[in-house]
Image (cartoon, rainbow, N blue to C red):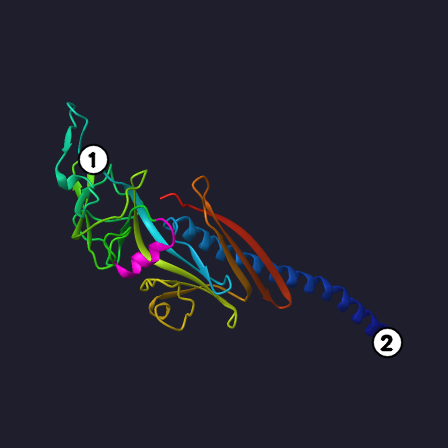
Protein backbone atom coordinates (compact mmCIF):
# COMPACT_ATOMS: atom_id res chain seq x y z
CA UNK A 1 0.00 0.00 0.00
CA UNK A 2 2.83 2.38 0.87
CA UNK A 3 4.50 1.69 -2.47
CA UNK A 4 1.24 2.26 -4.36
CA UNK A 5 0.67 5.53 -2.50
CA UNK A 6 4.19 6.64 -3.38
CA UNK A 7 3.65 5.91 -7.08
CA UNK A 8 0.35 7.80 -7.05
CA UNK A 9 1.96 10.78 -5.30
CA UNK A 10 4.76 10.98 -7.87
CA UNK A 11 2.26 10.70 -10.71
CA UNK A 12 0.04 13.43 -9.29
CA UNK A 13 3.06 15.66 -8.68
CA UNK A 14 4.07 15.31 -12.32
CA UNK A 15 0.53 16.06 -13.47
CA UNK A 16 0.44 19.23 -11.41
CA UNK A 17 4.02 20.34 -12.05
CA UNK A 18 3.86 20.60 -15.84
CA UNK A 19 0.81 22.89 -15.95
CA UNK A 20 2.33 25.04 -13.21
CA UNK A 21 5.62 25.29 -15.09
CA UNK A 22 3.73 26.13 -18.27
CA UNK A 23 1.76 28.83 -16.49
CA UNK A 24 4.95 30.31 -15.04
CA UNK A 25 6.59 30.34 -18.48
CA UNK A 26 3.58 32.07 -20.04
CA UNK A 27 3.59 34.63 -17.22
CA UNK A 28 7.31 35.36 -17.75
CA UNK A 29 6.79 35.80 -21.50
CA UNK A 30 3.81 38.09 -20.91
CA UNK A 31 5.85 40.19 -18.50
CA UNK A 32 8.71 40.47 -21.00
CA UNK A 33 6.33 41.44 -23.80
CA UNK A 34 4.78 44.13 -21.60
CA UNK A 35 8.22 45.52 -20.68
CA UNK A 36 9.38 45.60 -24.31
CA UNK A 37 6.11 47.10 -25.52
CA UNK A 38 6.30 49.85 -22.89
CA UNK A 39 9.87 50.68 -23.89
CA UNK A 40 8.97 50.87 -27.60
CA UNK A 41 5.96 53.06 -26.84
CA UNK A 42 8.16 55.48 -24.87
CA UNK A 43 10.67 55.70 -27.69
CA UNK A 44 7.93 56.13 -30.28
CA UNK A 45 6.44 59.10 -28.43
CA UNK A 46 9.80 60.86 -28.36
CA UNK A 47 10.54 60.09 -32.01
CA UNK A 48 7.23 61.56 -33.12
CA UNK A 49 8.21 64.77 -31.32
CA UNK A 50 11.72 64.83 -32.80
CA UNK A 51 12.87 67.99 -34.54
CA UNK A 52 12.94 67.22 -38.28
CA UNK A 53 16.28 65.82 -39.44
CA UNK A 54 17.66 65.53 -35.90
CA UNK A 55 17.61 61.73 -35.46
CA UNK A 56 21.08 60.15 -35.41
CA UNK A 57 22.36 56.69 -34.43
CA UNK A 58 25.80 55.33 -33.43
CA UNK A 59 27.24 52.48 -31.36
CA UNK A 60 26.44 49.67 -33.84
CA UNK A 61 22.83 50.79 -33.72
CA UNK A 62 22.60 50.73 -29.92
CA UNK A 63 22.51 54.49 -29.28
CA UNK A 64 19.84 56.81 -30.68
CA UNK A 65 19.72 60.59 -30.23
CA UNK A 66 17.21 63.27 -31.17
CA UNK A 67 16.26 66.86 -30.42
CA UNK A 68 12.92 66.83 -28.61
CA UNK A 69 10.27 69.43 -29.43
CA UNK A 70 7.52 70.55 -27.08
CA UNK A 71 5.50 72.76 -29.39
CA UNK A 72 5.43 74.82 -32.51
CA UNK A 73 3.65 77.39 -34.63
CA UNK A 74 3.85 79.30 -37.89
CA UNK A 75 5.73 82.56 -37.86
CA UNK A 76 4.65 85.82 -39.47
CA UNK A 77 6.82 86.46 -42.51
CA UNK A 78 5.18 89.65 -43.75
CA UNK A 79 3.49 92.67 -42.19
CA UNK A 80 -0.26 92.55 -42.31
CA UNK A 81 -3.62 93.51 -40.87
CA UNK A 82 -5.91 90.81 -39.50
CA UNK A 83 -9.65 91.24 -40.12
CA UNK A 84 -9.22 94.57 -41.98
CA UNK A 85 -12.22 96.80 -41.42
CA UNK A 86 -13.78 94.31 -39.06
CA UNK A 87 -14.48 94.50 -35.32
CA UNK A 88 -11.31 92.53 -34.51
CA UNK A 89 -8.93 94.46 -36.77
CA UNK A 90 -5.31 94.16 -35.61
CA UNK A 91 -2.42 95.95 -37.30
CA UNK A 92 0.80 93.90 -37.39
CA UNK A 93 2.76 96.04 -39.80
CA UNK A 94 5.48 97.11 -37.34
CA UNK A 95 8.95 95.80 -38.15
CA UNK A 96 9.04 93.91 -34.84
CA UNK A 97 5.92 91.97 -35.86
CA UNK A 98 7.48 89.87 -38.61
CA UNK A 99 10.54 87.68 -39.06
CA UNK A 100 12.90 89.36 -41.52
CA UNK A 101 15.75 86.77 -41.52
CA UNK A 102 18.18 89.64 -41.21
CA UNK A 103 18.73 89.20 -37.47
CA UNK A 104 15.66 89.50 -35.26
CA UNK A 105 14.92 89.82 -31.56
CA UNK A 106 11.14 90.03 -31.93
CA UNK A 107 8.50 88.66 -34.29
CA UNK A 108 4.91 87.43 -34.27
CA UNK A 109 3.34 84.06 -34.82
CA UNK A 110 0.31 83.39 -36.96
CA UNK A 111 -2.06 82.73 -34.09
CA UNK A 112 -0.87 81.10 -30.87
CA UNK A 113 2.02 78.98 -29.71
CA UNK A 114 0.68 75.53 -28.86
CA UNK A 115 1.86 72.18 -27.56
CA UNK A 116 3.04 73.02 -24.03
CA UNK A 117 2.17 75.18 -21.04
CA UNK A 118 3.72 78.63 -20.63
CA UNK A 119 2.80 82.03 -19.22
CA UNK A 120 2.77 85.19 -21.29
CA UNK A 121 5.50 87.56 -20.18
CA UNK A 122 7.47 84.90 -18.29
CA UNK A 123 10.69 83.59 -19.92
CA UNK A 124 10.55 79.98 -21.09
CA UNK A 125 12.65 77.43 -19.23
CA UNK A 126 16.40 77.91 -19.48
CA UNK A 127 17.83 76.02 -22.44
CA UNK A 128 14.64 76.24 -24.52
CA UNK A 129 15.46 76.97 -28.16
CA UNK A 130 13.67 77.89 -31.38
CA UNK A 131 14.40 76.22 -34.71
CA UNK A 132 13.43 77.24 -38.24
CA UNK A 133 14.03 75.04 -41.29
CA UNK A 134 16.49 72.51 -39.80
CA UNK A 135 17.83 70.50 -42.72
CA UNK A 136 20.49 67.81 -42.75
CA UNK A 137 22.77 66.68 -39.93
CA UNK A 138 24.23 70.19 -39.62
CA UNK A 139 21.56 71.00 -37.05
CA UNK A 140 23.71 69.33 -34.37
CA UNK A 141 26.83 71.36 -35.11
CA UNK A 142 24.81 74.56 -35.27
CA UNK A 143 23.15 73.77 -31.95
CA UNK A 144 26.43 72.84 -30.27
CA UNK A 145 28.36 75.85 -31.54
CA UNK A 146 25.50 78.37 -31.10
CA UNK A 147 26.11 79.73 -34.57
CA UNK A 148 24.34 82.80 -35.94
CA UNK A 149 23.23 82.76 -38.65
CA UNK A 150 21.98 79.27 -37.90
CA UNK A 151 18.79 77.18 -37.91
CA UNK A 152 18.46 77.17 -34.10
CA UNK A 153 18.84 79.82 -31.41
CA UNK A 154 21.77 79.58 -28.95
CA UNK A 155 21.25 77.69 -25.70
CA UNK A 156 21.83 80.82 -23.59
CA UNK A 157 19.28 82.96 -25.42
CA UNK A 158 16.25 83.62 -23.22
CA UNK A 159 12.88 83.39 -24.95
CA UNK A 160 9.68 85.11 -23.79
CA UNK A 161 6.21 84.91 -25.33
CA UNK A 162 3.94 87.94 -25.14
CA UNK A 163 0.25 88.34 -25.96
CA UNK A 164 -0.03 90.71 -28.92
CA UNK A 165 -3.82 90.87 -29.13
CA UNK A 166 -4.81 88.15 -31.58
CA UNK A 167 -1.31 86.73 -31.96
CA UNK A 168 1.59 85.62 -29.80
CA UNK A 169 4.84 87.54 -30.08
CA UNK A 170 8.27 85.96 -29.57
CA UNK A 171 10.99 88.10 -27.98
CA UNK A 172 14.64 87.10 -27.55
CA UNK A 173 17.09 88.75 -25.16
CA UNK A 174 19.61 88.78 -28.05
CA UNK A 175 18.88 88.92 -31.76
CA UNK A 176 19.37 85.81 -33.88
CA UNK A 177 19.50 85.35 -37.63
CA UNK A 178 17.96 82.16 -38.98
CA UNK A 179 19.63 80.74 -42.09
CA UNK A 180 16.71 80.05 -44.42
CA UNK A 181 12.97 80.51 -44.57
CA UNK A 182 10.74 77.51 -44.06
CA UNK A 183 8.48 76.94 -47.09
CA UNK A 184 5.63 76.36 -44.63
CA UNK A 185 6.78 79.06 -42.15
CA UNK A 186 7.16 76.44 -39.41
CA UNK A 187 8.82 77.23 -36.10
CA UNK A 188 9.69 74.56 -33.53
CA UNK A 189 10.28 74.85 -29.78
CA UNK A 190 13.12 72.53 -28.67
CA UNK A 191 13.47 71.72 -24.98
CA UNK A 192 16.22 69.08 -24.74
CA UNK A 193 18.34 66.51 -26.55
CA UNK A 194 17.32 62.92 -25.79
CA UNK A 195 19.48 59.79 -25.99
CA UNK A 196 18.36 56.17 -25.79
CA UNK A 197 21.33 53.98 -24.90
CA UNK A 198 21.37 50.19 -24.77
CA UNK A 199 23.77 48.88 -22.09
CA UNK A 200 24.01 45.15 -22.75
CA UNK A 201 26.58 44.63 -19.99
CA UNK A 202 23.92 45.54 -17.44
CA UNK A 203 20.95 44.43 -19.55
CA UNK A 204 19.42 47.92 -19.41
CA UNK A 205 17.95 50.49 -21.81
CA UNK A 206 18.44 54.09 -20.63
CA UNK A 207 16.83 57.41 -21.56
CA UNK A 208 19.06 60.46 -20.96
CA UNK A 209 17.97 64.09 -21.35
CA UNK A 210 18.93 67.63 -20.31
CA UNK A 211 22.62 67.46 -21.23
CA UNK A 212 24.83 69.67 -23.38
CA UNK A 213 24.60 69.22 -27.15
CA UNK A 214 27.79 68.14 -28.93
CA UNK A 215 28.61 68.05 -32.69
CA UNK A 216 29.56 64.36 -32.48
CA UNK A 217 27.01 61.99 -31.02
CA UNK A 218 27.93 60.82 -27.49
CA UNK A 219 27.70 57.09 -26.85
CA UNK A 220 29.10 56.52 -23.33
CA UNK A 221 26.77 56.82 -20.35
CA UNK A 222 29.70 57.21 -17.96
CA UNK A 223 31.28 60.27 -19.56
CA UNK A 224 30.21 63.84 -20.32
CA UNK A 225 27.87 65.04 -21.63
CA UNK A 226 25.60 62.03 -20.96
CA UNK A 227 26.92 61.62 -17.42
CA UNK A 228 25.61 65.10 -16.58
CA UNK A 229 22.07 64.48 -17.89
CA UNK A 230 18.86 63.25 -16.33
CA UNK A 231 18.88 59.44 -16.55
CA UNK A 232 15.85 57.13 -16.44
CA UNK A 233 15.71 53.35 -16.86
CA UNK A 234 13.36 52.45 -19.70
CA UNK A 235 13.75 48.64 -19.64
CA UNK A 236 15.71 45.90 -17.90
CA UNK A 237 16.48 42.26 -18.82
CA UNK A 238 17.59 43.58 -22.21
CA UNK A 239 19.48 41.01 -24.28
CA UNK A 240 19.65 42.90 -27.57
CA UNK A 241 18.59 46.19 -29.07
CA UNK A 242 19.28 47.74 -32.44
CA UNK A 243 18.05 50.98 -33.97
CA UNK A 244 18.11 51.95 -37.64
CA UNK A 245 17.21 55.23 -39.33
CA UNK A 246 16.14 55.57 -42.94
CA UNK A 247 16.20 59.33 -43.65
CA UNK A 248 13.19 60.81 -45.37
CA UNK A 249 12.97 62.53 -48.72
CA UNK A 250 10.97 65.44 -50.07
CA UNK A 251 8.02 63.09 -50.66
CA UNK A 252 8.02 60.82 -47.60
CA UNK A 253 8.80 60.81 -43.90
CA UNK A 254 11.85 59.15 -42.41
CA UNK A 255 11.51 55.76 -40.75
CA UNK A 256 13.18 54.58 -37.56
CA UNK A 257 13.23 50.82 -36.93
CA UNK A 258 13.37 49.81 -33.27
CA UNK A 259 14.38 46.25 -32.39
CA UNK A 260 14.55 44.99 -28.81
CA UNK A 261 14.92 41.52 -27.25
CA UNK A 262 14.36 40.75 -23.56
CA UNK A 263 15.17 37.49 -21.75
CA UNK A 264 14.49 36.07 -18.30
CA UNK A 265 14.23 32.62 -16.73
CA UNK A 266 14.82 30.82 -20.00
CA UNK A 267 12.16 32.84 -21.82
CA UNK A 268 12.91 35.34 -24.58
CA UNK A 269 10.81 37.83 -26.55
CA UNK A 270 11.85 39.79 -29.62
CA UNK A 271 9.86 42.85 -30.77
CA UNK A 272 10.28 44.98 -33.89
CA UNK A 273 8.58 48.34 -34.39
CA UNK A 274 8.80 51.08 -37.02
CA UNK A 275 8.10 54.76 -36.41
CA UNK A 276 7.55 57.47 -39.00
CA UNK A 277 9.45 60.64 -38.14
CA UNK A 278 8.89 64.06 -39.77
CA UNK A 279 11.60 65.36 -42.04
CA UNK A 280 9.91 68.28 -43.81
CA UNK A 281 10.74 71.34 -41.75
Residue 189, given in percent of the width and then of the height, sits at 29, 49
Q: Quadrant of the N terminus?
A: bottom right
Which of 25 and 61 lies nearest the eye of the viewer? 61
Front-most of residues 167 and 130:
130
Q: Quadrant of residue 280?
A: top left
Position of residue 46 measured from the top left corner of the image (x, y, whole percent): 41, 53
Which numbered tag is attached to residue 276?
none
Callout 2–callout 1 Cβ contact below 8 Å: no
Q: Which residue reaches farthest top?
A: 85
Q: Residue 166: x, y in percent? A: 19, 35
Q: Is residue 104 above or below residue 210?
A: above
Q: Where does the image place residue 181, in percent across and percent down from the top left?
A: 28, 42
Sequence-wise first label, 2 or 1: 2
Q: Is residue 15 above or below residue 253?
A: below
Which residue shows up at 76% across the image and 64% down it? Answer: 15
Look at 20% across and 56% down and name the residue there: 157
Say which of 96 and 119 sits in front.
96
Residue at 30% in and 57% down:
143
What main secondary structure does the magenta stretch of the protein show? helix
> Tag 2's secondary structure?
helix
**Callout 1 secondary element:** loop
Q: Give the labeled residue for mark 2.
A: 3
Q: Is residue 185 above or below residue 275?
A: above
Q: Tell me: residue 12, above or below residue 119.
A: below
Magenta stretch: give its range. 135-146
> Is residue 199 in the magenta section?
no
What number is the disc on residue 78?
Answer: 1
Mark 1 nearby-residue class (10 Å; few <14, some 14–19, many ≥20): some
In the picture, the quarter occupied by the C terminus is: top left
Amino acid sequence: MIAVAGVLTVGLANLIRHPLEGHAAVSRRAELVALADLALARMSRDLRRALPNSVRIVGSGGVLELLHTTGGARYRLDPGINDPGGPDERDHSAESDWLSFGGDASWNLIGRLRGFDFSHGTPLASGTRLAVFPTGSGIWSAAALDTSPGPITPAETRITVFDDGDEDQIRLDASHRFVRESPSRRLYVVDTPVTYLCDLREGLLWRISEYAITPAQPADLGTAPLSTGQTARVAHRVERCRFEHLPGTATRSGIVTLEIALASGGERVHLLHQVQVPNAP
